[in-house]
Amino acid sequence: MFQSLSEKLDSAFKIIKGDNKLTELNIAESIKEIRRALVAADVNYKIAKEFTDKIKDKALGTENVLKAVRPGELMVKIVQDELIDLMGGQSEGINVKGNPGIVLITGLQGSGKTTFTGKLANYLKTKKSKKPLLVACDVYRPAAIDQLSVLAEQVGVAIYKEVENKNPVEIAQNAIAYAKGHGHDVVIVDTAGRLAVDQEMMDEIARVHKAIQPTETLFVVDSMTGQDAVNTAKAFNDILNFDGVVLTKLDGDTRGGAALSIKYTVGKPIKFVSTGEKMEALDVFHPDRMAQRILGMGDVISLVEKAQEQFDEAEAKRLEAKIKKNKFDFNDFIGQIQQIKKMGDLKSLMNMIPGMSKMTKDIDIDENAFLKVEAIVQSMTPAERKNPELLNINRKKRIAKGCGRDLNEINQFIKQFDQMRQMMHRVSKMPIPTGMMPGMGGLKR
């Protein structure tokens, strides 16, 4: 995400990297490039100028201060602080208090509103131990109810729908009554969107809002639309006075304009960011972590949190014991792959590692990268998975035929697995977590 913006900012910092101190001249040159980078990222010029003016004032005020810090590093720190402030300063939670808590989802058609509704239900269920009820109030878009039904089934939550009823206010009110009678502590109402802001749409969403009095109203916006997203958010906020913003499609060709300027323009925080289609691909928005990503510093904290979500202490102890005995097998290997896949798409995970975004910017990371090794393991018998030592030449030939790979690839995979297992055994006495393991590459696609 924000690849182009990150590269342009990096170029701006290079202007003063070799200098001994910050001067009016090198600050001015760097500021000009930062402003250009922001405008190219579809940030409103007024916001970009105000932002860079603050950076300039802070940079000029650092004379004879922090002499041990290099000028380039100092400028990065100043920009980082200002980016955090521009995006809201700190993360803000979602309010689902009430009996039940009511969350109203709004936004234009095509913004990823319905998909986010499913993701939010999954988030509240798995991370907040809630029992959400999805409500289908998009009575216009063909298959909208069907889409929400599929998502509800996918994340294992209930859905309330009235297929023949075309009155979203009635549907929402009936759903809340149903939730109270069936033990649902959160109601998430998915509403209709339009291709553009119009009076009819605004009147309808205002009626729904007034009728159900939500504890939380979220505006979902496609982050790829840049400044248009900010203008749309302002139009909705004038009518609804919503509580927060959700940025979707951050895994796409996002320039960054919406993320950087929506809080400044609307005065409401970004609460969630969404990437990809997986129901787990939803993150609480942290301005400080996003600033680090934009500046190419990665986001190790979020990466660790994602790993911890998949970390099972009892399973880790079991694996640790097997590794120490050099008994780590293919069943354990597949189990670890499943944990990694649940953490999110591979490129997003790699970009959380400092410096990795530059290394992988031109690399197409295949989301199906694990399928080939899974196919190899699944072509083994239960006994072979449990006892890798059984794999003689005849068994390897049968496995190759079963998974559609050639024998050389099978040999390569088994060799890599054995090397990994031996390495894990050697370091098993070191104080490292066993909930994650080194990946295996090198197989042909």
Image (tube, rainbow, N blue to C red):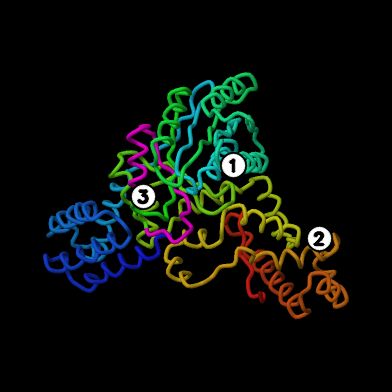
Percent of width and height locating residue 130:
58, 31
> What segment is highlighted magenta in the picture?
229-255
For label 3, the residue is 288
Q: Nearer the viewer, residue 55 or 167?
A: 167
Binning the other alpha carbons within 10 Å of mark 3 as few (below 14), some (14 to 19) or many (20 upward) gives: many
For label 1, the residue is 144
Q: Which of 158 and 205 is in front in this view?
A: 205
As measured in the structure, the alpha-carbon distance from the residue carrying label 2 to the one carrying label 3 is 45 Å
Q: Is residue 10 left or right of residue 375?
A: left
Q: In this view, does 64 lie to the left or right of 247?
A: left
* In this view, the mark in front (2 or 3): 3
Q: Is residue 239 magenta?
A: yes
As measured in the structure, the alpha-carbon distance from the residue carrying label 3 to the one carrying label 1 is 36 Å
For label 2, the residue is 386
Kind of residue indicated by mark 3: Asp
Residue at figure coordinates x 85%, y 69% from the top left: 390
Kind of residue indicated by mark 2: Lys
Residue at figure coordinates x 44%, y 61% from the top left: 253
Q: Is residue 361 left or right of residue 311?
A: left
Tell me the quarter of the picture where residue 24 sits: bottom left
Say which label, 3 or 1, has the lower sequence index. 1
Residue at figure coordinates x 28%, y 44% from the top left: 265
Q: How many marks?
A: 3
Tell me the quarter of the picture where residue 202 sits: top left
Residue 303 versus residue 415 in the image, above or below: above
